[in-house]
Image (cartoon, helix red, strand yellow):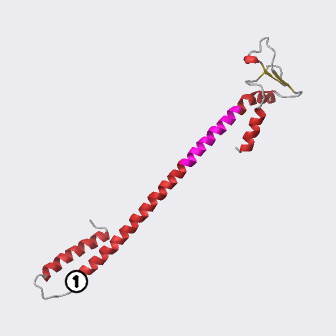
């Protein structure tokens, strides 16, 4: 509901006699308001008389006195709920953006480390292709091959 509609409804209520209003059975076309709701012997403070008014029209006019303020209160409550929901959504979106940024950074770091491991495995395998005269070369190559194999297994997702 727009502010214009709620402002018009509030303006229509200004100075209006308090409710509730009722219709008197058998007096179609008349809407009555009695002080403190007692119409036994008291003079009404509000009487609406319109020729040709149906019972439905009378009932509507009588109900409007209390219904309009209730509807305005509900609009205000819903606006408050909407503002709260919008604030929570903004916080959720902000939190999601922060976590997404962290996840993206972590993913980039994982890719960087994968590249470094791939390069290390490649270098270890390349070193194994050399044949220096060192007598420990075979042991070193076996260790390097095992390390390279394990690195490649991690990169493949093996455990």
Whether the magenta-drawn stretch holds residue 79 is answered as yes
Instruction: Place residue 116 in its image quadrant.
Output: bottom left
Query: Residue beneath label 1, please?
Result: 127
Q: Is residue 46 above or below residue 114?
A: above
Q: Which residues are magenta?
A: 69-87
Between 125 and 76, the one nearer to me in the picture: 76
Between 104 and 39, the one nearer to me in the picture: 104
Q: Could you tell me what secondary structure mostly forms the magenta stretch?
A: helix
Image position, residue 158 (x, y; %): 28, 67
Question: Taking 89 as reference, is 38 left or right?
Answer: right
Rendered residue at 24%/75% (across/down)? 148
Image position, residue 4 (x, y; %): 74, 44
Q: Is residue 56 above or below residue 93?
A: above
Rendered residue at 25%/83% (across/down)? 126
Tag 1's secondary structure? helix
Quarter of the C terminus within the rendering: bottom left
Image position, residue 73 (x, y; %): 66, 35
């Amino acid at each position: 509901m727009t502010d214009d509609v709620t402002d018009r409804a509030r303006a229509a209520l200004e100075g209006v006699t308090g409710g509730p209003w009722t219709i008197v059975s058998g007096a179609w076309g008349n809407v009555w308001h009695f002080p403190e709701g007692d119409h036994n012997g008291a003079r009404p403070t509000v009487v609406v008389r319109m020729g040709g008014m149906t019972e439905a029209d009378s009932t509507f006019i009588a109900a409007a006195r209390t219904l309009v303020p209730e509807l305005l209160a509900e609009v205000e409550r819903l606006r408050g709920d909407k503002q709260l929901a919008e604030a929570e959504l903004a916080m959720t979106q902000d939190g999601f953006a922060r976590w997404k940024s962290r996840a993206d950074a972590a993913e980039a770091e994982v890719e960087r480390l994968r590249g470094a491991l791939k390069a290390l495995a490649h270098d270890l395998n390349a070193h194994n292709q050399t044949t220096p005269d060192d007598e420990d070369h075979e042991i070193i190559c076996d260790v390097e091959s095992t390390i390279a194999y394990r690195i490649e297994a991690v990169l493949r997702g093996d455990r």
